[in-house]
Amino acid sequence: MSVHAAAISDETGDTLDDILCAIQASWSHRTTNPPNAIPSTADQLEGWIFDPSLLP
């Protein structure tokens, strides 16, 4: 089954969440300022949601 078909047929939305997470992870990996898009003020013990709108 293709990713597209899986996303359409997944009523829970988990496949779409996975796709969006992969896009955000790819974007953050390529971001260098700040490194990996994680601000220096972020709590190192907590997770971080990578969002381009949060960059300075």
Image (cartoon, rainbow, N blue to C red):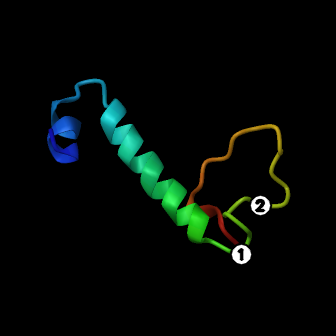
Q: Which residue is mark 2?
A: 39
Count of marks overlaid on the render: 2
In this view, the residue in front, 33 or 2, is 2
Residue 49 in the image, given as x and y percentages of width and height: 61, 48
Q: Which amino acid does the dot numbered 2 rest on?
A: Pro
Q: Secondary structure at mark 2?
A: loop
Q: Could you classify mark 1 by the number of other residues whose Cα lies within 10 Å: few (under 14), some (14-19), or many (20 or more)?
A: few
Quarter of the rendering containing residue 56: bottom right
In this view, the residue in front, 16 or 29, is 29
Instruction: Report whether 46 appears left or right of 49.
Output: right
Q: Could you classify mark 2 by the number of other residues whose Cα lies within 10 Å: few (under 14), some (14-19), or many (20 or more)?
A: some
Q: Which amino acid does the dot numbered 1 rest on?
A: Asn
Q: Residue drawn 46% across and 47% down?
A: 21
Instruction: Report whether 23 appears left or right of 11.
Output: right
The answer to whether residue 52 is seen in the rendering is no
Residue 11, placed above or below residue 21:
above
Instruction: Report whether 18 appears left or right of 13.
Output: right
Quarter of the rendering containing residue 2: top left
Q: Which residue is mark 1?
A: 33
Residue 10 in the image, given as x and y percentages of width and height: 23, 29
In this view, the residue in front, 42 or 18, is 18
